[in-house]
Amino acid sequence: MRSFSICRCISLLVLSAVVTSCAMGPDYQRPQTDAEDRFRMADGQSDLPSLANLPWWELLRDEQLQQLIRMALAENYDLQRAVATIEEFRARALITQTDYLPQITAAASAPAGRSAVFLFPGFASPFNYYLLGNLSWEMDLWGRVRRTNEAARADLLSREENRRAVTIQLVSAVAEAYFNLLQFDLQLDIAERTLQSWEESVRIAQARLRQGMTSKLDADQFEAERANAAARTAELHRQMVQAENHLSILLGRKPFAVARGRSLDQQIVPPDVPAGLPSELLQRRPDLLAAEQQLAAVTARIGAAKAERFPRITLTGLAGLAHPELSLIFTEASSFGVFGAGLAAPLLNAQVLGFQQEAIEAQTKQAVAQYQQAVLTAFREVEDALVAVQTARVQSESQQQQVTALQSALKLADLRYRGGLANYLDVLVARRNLFEAELALTSTRRLLLASVVQLYKALGGGWTPDAQSPEVSTKG
């Protein structure tokens, strides 16, 4: 009957704690942001599905590039570190959840001598042998435990979004490094072809010099251009190898010769790159979602800090077995139990706890400013990428026309020079202009491809770490 009264008392106390408990501090609310109806450089395409809805393997159609990206997703160390961070904060969140549960400890003693004794309050006799079970449970009247769990959960969500941000960053970084490599490949091919042309021109100039049909100045000019092409070829070869080394590190491997797929001028560029609605960024970009969860975490910690300034009520219980003789410790007479409640309130450290709350409130203001700045940066990156795609497309078309015209001009100048109808200057200028124009066209093609990837990243991508591409092999 007595045990029933104790259980009923505990039940009433617990029910009272649940009914009357409240979580102190402000509830999280997303800060207000000014989002326009459309992006400034969107060309009226805001009603179309966003480019970011595509998974990366549908945007990047080069099979070799897809293989490299899968390799990076499996072996990149930055991504592995981000995944390990999630595991850490998931464990921390589980630890925090245990604050909801009663804390139970146990102790036992069976001394070899008669010197050790156990003195229990209220018991006059010493006991050399005992078994103890201690239980304590904090009644979360002010929501300290609840707010602490909210903060831990937000910290975990923030790290999960950070993992997605690292993943999207890695996909885009591999793609851009691959396009840089293809650019150097194509430019190196152009430089080598130009070098061969200059070597042929030098050979002809030397022959004409021996025949007295040209001057030493003309021959020296051709030789100078040949040497310039040779120097550019060596420079581009260095850049190509360094680009391979950079891409290798992204793949989580030592520098190696990276296999190529389609050449730069064979890469598929989407005809349309709609950005979607600006408001979608707030729900899509992982860096914004991570910053928002960080703000939610520090907001919850305001309530936890405020609750620290109020008394804690703890239910405690003690039960066990104790007896001077080990052989009699498990008899009914050796059992005992106590139940009670404790109250702990801050006194001398109340001012310190107030300062801690003010510090966390200041951290919240910092997190709000950081989130709003991240939103502005996201909008700027989208606008920058949009204008880069649009202008690079037009620039590429114009430069292609320029290259076609210069190819025709060089052909005519070379025929006239070989026929003695023009001097060396016409050929020199035409070939030099064509060389520079072809290199510039290659750079612009790479810029167009990279701008599409940057827009995809700026929009938040459309791929999550749980999604699977059609092929998941990571063997290169």
Image: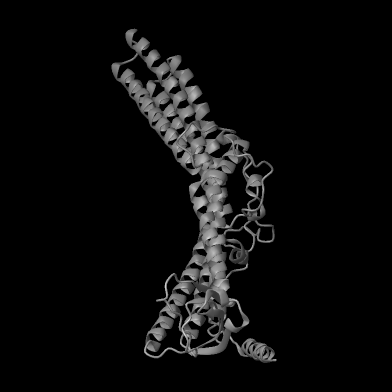
- Image quadrant in which you'd find residue 436: top left
Who's the residue at 50% across and 76% down the image?
129
Residue drawn at (59%, 33%) of the image: 261
Taking depth in this image into account, of 270 and 111 the one nearest to the observer is 111
Residue at the farthest left position: 216
Query: Is residue 467 visible to us here?
Result: yes
Would you say residue 383 is visible in this rendering? no
**Front residue of 210 and 389:** 389
Q: Give the percent coordinates (x, y) of residue 429.
A: 41, 28
Give how far across and how far down residue 260 sits, in percent. 55, 32
Q: How is the image coloured?
A: one colour
Q: Residue at x 38, y 86 (%)?
A: 349
The image position of residue 294, as x and y in percent, is 51, 69
Q: Is residue 135 above or below residue 435?
A: below
Left or right relative to 24: residue 428: left
Pick the residue in front: 182 or 42: 182
Q: Is residue 436 above or below residue 141?
A: above
Which residue is more in the foreground, 55 or 318?
Answer: 318
Please state, as top left, top right, bottom left or bottom right, where the C terminus lies in the image: top right
Number of residue marks:
0
Image quadrant in which the N terminus is located: bottom right
Q: Measuring 42% from the left and 75% from the top, which residue is drawn there?
A: 114
- The relative height of residue 222 versus residue 6 in the rendered view (above or below) is above
Q: Position of residue 299 (x, y in %)?
A: 51, 77
Relative to residue 327, is residue 6 depicted above or below?
Answer: below
